[in-house]
Amino acid sequence: MITASLVTFHTKPSDLLRLIKCILNSNISIFYIIDNSSNDSLREYSQISEKIKYIHSQNLGFGHGHNIALEMALAQGAKYHVIINPDIYWKDNVIEELTSFMDKNNDCGQVMPKILYPNGETQLLCKLIPTPINLIGRRFIPIKAIKQKIDAKYELHHSGYNTIMEIPVLSGCFMFVRMDIIKKVGLFDERYFMYCEDVDLCRRIGEISRTMFYPNVSVYHEYDKGSYKKKKLLKYHICSTIKYFNKWGWIIDKKRTKTNKRCLSQIKNRNNNSIKDNHSKL
């Protein structure tokens, strides 16, 4: 069984309807809508299909909301679960392809498809495990060229985003996870109200399984860097970042160093092999 969940906070009805259409056209059996809004006006959408389960919840954060759904999915015996943002949608058999990939790769605990902007441009959401510079320092770097160089490494620009690869941190906008792994590593850490909870969970999944980028299918994401525009969201971002580094380590994080080095080495070796193959064809 495949289940999915959405945590909504005054989501636009048009976005929700678009996502519901994608869900109902897929092999997802149950779709949990965890509504953190101040009212339950979205409850009516549960009447669209028996697949949709609506839960109106107190707003205790992104992770808390999805944990409600994850606990229900575990109780239902779900094999896989998809954590989805409300501004996600797709056109092809994305869920079916990702299911097939996971079925064939039992050592994979999480997979992410290619994420696109609505105009078709690739979103650079494959990342290394972040350092304080990545999450805090870059905001205050005045020289654009330095900032771009830091981002290029952190977001793995040189990977090309065109091949299946193991990535340390996958985006929380679309998390396709294996529930047997979730049983072992636990749910979202609810100390993060918003931001960094996806990095934290992905790291824990990656410690006992592989976290994979699968670009053969793609979803669209109307990405909005809210923390760069709204002071309240920026506050959440800073608080979560501090909690994250207090948990995992600020300067000294041996697991981060080892994992990032391995990822960069794998990409470098793959790129070198690709160059050799191209030369041999000349």
Image (cartoon, helix red, strand yellow):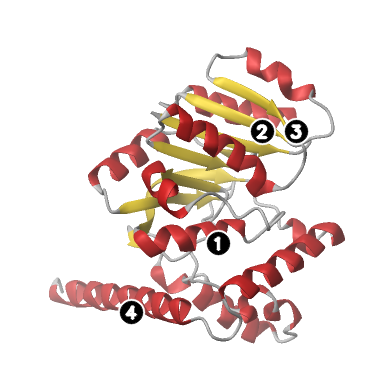
Which callout, 3 or 4, points at the residue further toward the start of the chain?
3
Relative height, residue 41 to residue 177 (above, below): above
Which callout, 2 or 4, points at the residue further toward the start of the chain?
2
Which callout, 1 or 4, points at the residue further toward the start of the chain?
1
Callout 2 touching callout 1 (CB < 8 Å): no
Q: Which mark is residue 228?
A: none
In space, the residues marked 2 and 1 are separated at their CA atoms by 21 Å
Mark 1 neighbour density, 10 Å: few (under 14) some (14–19) many (20 or more) = many
Instruction: Give the amino acid at mark 2.
Output: Ile
Compared across the picture, whether 71 is left or right of 76 comes to right
Instruction: Give the residue at mark 2.
Output: 34
- Residue visible at 70% across and 64% down? 240
Q: Does residue 85 appear in the picture of this structure? A: no
In percent of width and height, residue 39 lies at 83, 28
In percent of width and height, residue 162 lies at 37, 59
Instruction: Give the residue at mark 4.
Output: 265
Instruction: Give the residue at mark 3.
Output: 12
Q: Does residue 5 appear in the picture of this structure? A: yes
Which callout, 3 or 1, points at the residue further toward the start of the chain?
3
